[in-house]
Amino acid sequence: MRFDRHAFEAKGHLVVPGFIDLHAHLREPGFEDSETIETGRRAALRGGFTTICAMPNTEPPIDSPGLVKELLGRGHGVNGARVHYVATITRGRKGRELADMVELAAAGAVAFSDDGSPVQDPRLFRSALEYARVTGRPVIEHPEDLALSAKGVMHEGTVSARLGLPGIPAAAEETAVARDIALARMTGARLHLTHLSTGGSIDLVRRAKADGLPVTCDVTPHHLAMTDEWVAGSRALAWEVEDEALLAGPYESSTKVNPPLRGRADVRALWAGLVDGTVDAIATDHAPHASVKKEVEFDQAAFGISGFETAVALVLGGVGVHWAALGTVIDALTVGPARVLGIEVPRDDWTVIDRDAEWIVRADEMASKGKNTPLIGRTLTGRVVATVVGGEVAYEGEARVTEAISRR
Amino acid sequence: MSSSKPGVGGAEPLRKEVAGRRPWNRRHVLDTDDWSREEIETVLDQTRAMREILQRPIRRAPPLRGRTVILFFAEASTRTRVSFELAAKALSADVTNITASGSSVEKGESLYDTVRTLQALGGDVVVMRHASSGAPYFVAERTDAAVINAGDGWHAHPTQGLLDAYTLRDAVGDLEGKRVAIVGDVLHSRVARSDINTLLPLGARVTLSGPPTLIPSAWRCGQLPPGVTYEPDLDRALDGADAVIALRLQRERQETGLLPSLREYARVWGLTAERVGRMRPGAPVMHPGPMNEGIEIDAAVAHGTRSLIETQVTNGVAVRMALLYLLAATVPLEERV
């Protein structure tokens, strides 16, 4: 079905360019019980994302030009988002020797990242940045000093003190951000810091940008909307008043994510970074997991939140309380990430949003195989009603959603 | 949502058959952090009645006849398990043990599998000890049994908190305005958290003391719960205190870089007779056991006149009886059969 923009606008919907996600996990190859390229592409469309970047922490990891080419050959069906592949920085993501970065870029890798297992050796990371500069592709860095985060499972603060859970201090991220910026300054490479979660990290990037360094960064919808109180059972979005009726049990592993959900002041600092342009993009870090990885003790559970399908509602929530302008967040979902990747925003990709639609997040309605989100059962406001790829309507929300809207 | 922790729902409380003297409608005992003073006092009053039973020539009463109590200890513990076993048997419950060791990942059997087994076995009460903070919530959400947390990770040990409160109140009277020092490895201590959560509602204030690396960083930086202070200098923490609770120091803390040496720890934060003398005259000394004598506590203090350490063990059985009774009694305590 060809996209008729006016028909949607006539219903009062918002029509914006298709969203671009710099950071997602599609789990294929290797972990198809958690997600496949196809289910991930469909879930992305339901969230309004028409272009997504798949991270290379698969099995085998995306560290060879052959695998990049092979994957680029998969997933071209019309009912899914466009997929770019991020290749590893180091062979096998082991942090010991560089992957063949020039050849990986030539094969079509859009960026480089050892996401989840960040390169700890600063000398090796320096080499990676030098090489990335030659390829013209950015390094997407998950900044974390693994010695400082150690066995931590949630943000280190008053909530971790109360719950008796090992903490991940803000400094585990900030020391890595500081190191990375120093190395970017030295090499002149394009460094993109992903899923920043603390006010201190935002301050460091703000200063780096003021110095004219080619450093960019993104934040996730969940870090913009949730605090560490969610681990203790809160289900109030950062701008909502704590509500007994919204409480869940403590130690829900769906709230376990890396970097961890931080404190309220950090959340506000991320929004401030969006508003003043320090933050270039909003990326989901969509991290689906099969239930066996999450139906375990909190400290044993896998890190990650399934994020595609709830991203818009979370981000629009902050717009609703004037923490940022609508244009700011739409930019951070479209032209911002395109600039980070050095790609054009596809001309005929569109996302249609009903800003007023109230809906309940239900596991059985999610297209992603990963139902791991603490938002299950929550009412959210704002929903993607249609997504357009290359001028064709690739996703259209269920009729009853549209009916519910027209009945008002 | 009732007063119990939200999200932990399920069937009706087991104890509805017995009319309680005071409101106590918990379905589980997972943590005392959201308990009211009245709820805590109900348990402490019930504990007094249980102590009386323990002093009888035949230490057995019928209230839990027909109930099955499953002791599920996924982490080694003899003292607490035996204490619960004696408590359950003194109330005529059937008691059975499930032991598991190691983490789910290593041993193949997941906690999820164990919960399904527990559910199929049909126990009325599950008493559980687990190395992971929050594991009892996982179990409580997935079984119809009443769950008693017998210690989870660094998080909580509610029966220890309650028995410490009972023991203290017995020794020093009303806890309103009393100051209790808790000394040692607070960061990794479920006992410290449960002591704080139980003593504060009873009106006590708590002073924490110990090495900065073994105090949660937020608490060290002034973001303490109301009524709690941190005083790194043990002498000052003890000055005028009404009681002190020493915590067990795990020897591996030194190996993981949190302590310079056990010798230094003993000198700076060990309870000596001289230091204990800084408290109010007669102020008691407690310890959850097992003790490292000569490290966190001197032998002379551990076995001295101020020590309540053995009384704590005795009271532990009575507190556990009280909770089992409140959670799962089929007939009133007073009924003779």
Image: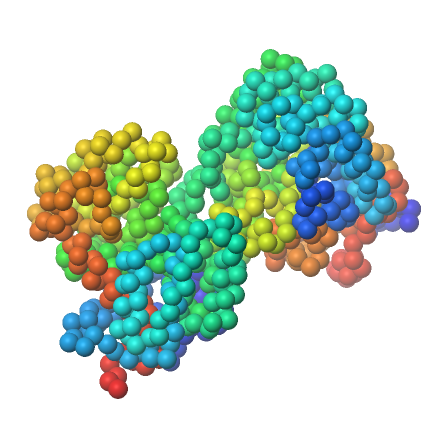
Residue at 49% from the left image edge and 42% from the top image edge: A153
Where is residue A351? Give x, y as percent.
Answer: 79, 43
Where is residue B201? Give x, y as percent.
Answer: 29, 56
The answer to whether B175 appears left or right of A261 in the picture is: left
Figure check: A172 above or below A226: above
Q: Nearer the viewer, residue A363 or A384?
A: A363
Residue at 69% from the left image edge and 43% from the top image edge: A30
Name the quadrant containing residue A14: top right
Figure check: A399 above or below B121: above
The answer to whether B250 appears left or right of A389 in the picture is: left
Q: How many marks?
A: 0
Name the quadrant containing residue B163: bottom left
Figure check: A228 above or below A56: below
Figure check: A6 above or below A400: above
**Residue A23 in view (yes/no):** no
Q: Nearer the viewer, residue A81 or B33?
A: A81
